[in-house]
Image: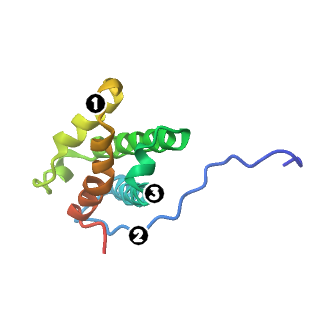
Amino acid sequence: MNGGDRDVRRQEPNRAPVRPTGGADERVVRRLADLVEMARLADALVARGLEAYLAEDFAGQTLRLAGRALVLQVATVVEKLPESFKAQYPDVEWAKIQRMRNIIAHHYDRVLDEFVWESLRSRVPELVASLDLVD
């Protein structure tokens, strides 16, 4: 590359190993690894604190946008998981995850930031734990 050019190729984030579930294909394993990474990001976002998250300044607005984007990504991954996989986890509220995605994507003006915060703080980690993706 030339001196001022940057290498913009996508780099894989450091991902925690995900144990394949019984008969899971490679796409499912990758998606589960994505969920683990998203839970890690949610944890990092939550570590900034609720006050910072709800602040009306630029930093708070940025955190809220990041939180919403993260919830959308989680729901997108969940949507792509096969129904046969989801059927193995009947206690996971799959439909609620999709409803949250639809609210953020289509009714952004009605999103309650405290609800997104709670999703990041507890629901995303609970999802990862329910799927037995954490040690």
State the CA–CA distance, disc 3 to disc 1.
26 Å
Disc nearer the start of the sequence (2/3): 2
State the CA–CA distance, disc 2 to disc 3.
26 Å
Q: Nearer the viewer, residue 118 or 8?
A: 118
The residue identified by callout 2 is 17
Q: Nearer the viewer, residue 48 or 34?
A: 48
State the image coordinates of residue 110 (x, y, percent, origin top left): 29, 27
The residue identified by callout 1 is 102
In the displayed structure, 96 sits above or below 106; it is below
Q: Amino acid at mark 3?
A: Arg
Q: Which mark is residue 48?
A: 3
Secondary structure under the numbered disc 2 in the rendered image: loop
Which color mode does the image show?
A: rainbow
Q: Residues within 10 Å of mark 1 (few under 14, many from 20)?
A: some
Q: Quadrant of residue 23?
A: bottom left
Q: Nearer the viewer, residue 16 or 117?
A: 117
Q: Amino acid at mark 2?
A: Pro
